[in-house]
Image: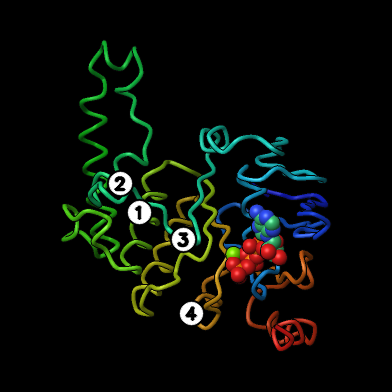
Amino acid sequence: MILRTFSLSKFFDGLKALDRVNIEVEEGKITLVIGPNGSGKTTLINVITGFYKADEGKVEYKGEDITNKPPHELYRRGIVRTFQIPKPLKKLTVLENLLIARENPGEGIVGALTKAYIPKEKESVTKAFEILEFLGIEHLWDEEAQNLSGGQLRLVEIGRALMSDADLFVMDEPLAGVAPKLSHDILGRMRELCEMGKTFLIVEHRLDIVLEYVDKVYVMASGRIIAEGKGKEVIEKPEVVEVYLGA
Ligand SMILES: Nc1ncnc2c1ncn2[C@@H]1O[C@H](COP(=O)(O)OP(=O)(O)OP(=O)(O)O)[C@@H](O)[C@H]1O
Ligand SMILES: [Mg+2]
């Protein structure tokens, strides 16, 4: 397992947003977390990726304890996340938003002295264009982020994550606002990335689209994992049907 949580809990003024959550994320696979609104999915991502501190429990990544490590340290270790609401820099262009997502060695003193940043920077631009082309937004490379539609912003958000050399991608509703055809394309590409050893932990509401692509599903309700399984059969479990009908 590349990532594991052990009895992970997070409280907000007495509310158990996460209540002893145990999940396992297998390397080279797509793990999906679903659940009704307010069930704790984003909180789980926030605690795993260091944006919130856990109150109890533990997170292990590649066998090491990473509980409550800050996001930048987790990024260095190979974990990158995307947000439910995309957070691009609005005055920057699409290309610039991708480029700044990648750590620039030219900013380090050694890199600056040796000019090692020149090939790296060229390589980054090439990589950015490859990603934009894949996401079907290459023509928007020069557009300021503030002029993009919601769906296009979502793609920029995914593009920023792909710019990193991360091993584990943690994505909060990556397909919200993305048209079905493109959503299928993106999920297909995620599967290709899995074959290259990348790992995805995603939260997604659009089960009709996403279920066929994922290896493992966890269902949350009121901060707890109430069911887990391999795919479509999970959402047919009575306890899962019940929380969705109740919501
Ligand atoms: N920063 C916070 N302060 C106080 N309460 C919070 C905070 N973040 C989340 N919560 C509460 O924790 C619970 C879980 O919220 P969370 O955002 O994790 O749900 P979610 O499953 O991501 O929902 P959605 O599907 O709507 O995105 C909710 O009751 C929410 O109001
Ligand atoms: Mg959420």
Q: Note whether 75 is above or below 19 in the view shown.
A: above
| Label 3 neighbour load within 10 Å: few <14, some 14-19, many 20+ | some
Mark 3 CB lies closer than 8 A to ligand 2 = no
Which residue is at a point 51% across and 66% down the rendered structure image? 173
152 up-or-down from 163: above or below: below
The amino acid marked with disc number 2 is Asn
Type of amino acid at the residue the image marks with label 1: Gly
Q: Are marks 4 and 2 in contact (CB under 8 Å)?
A: no
**Closer to us: mark 1 or mark 3?**
3
Disc 4 residue lies near ligand 1 with CB under 8 A: no
Judging from the image, the colouring scheme is rainbow
Question: Mark 3 or mark 4, which is nearer the start of the sequence?
Answer: 3
Residue at image location 31% in from the left, 17% down from the top:
111
Does label 2 or label 1 sit earlier along the sequence?
Answer: 2
Residue matched to label 4: 209
Local crowd size for mark 4, using a 10 Å CA cut-off: few (<14), some (14–19), many (≥20)? some
Residue plotted at (66% across, 41% down): 61
**Where residue 4 sits in the image (x, y, percent)?**
72, 49
Label 1 sits on residue = 159
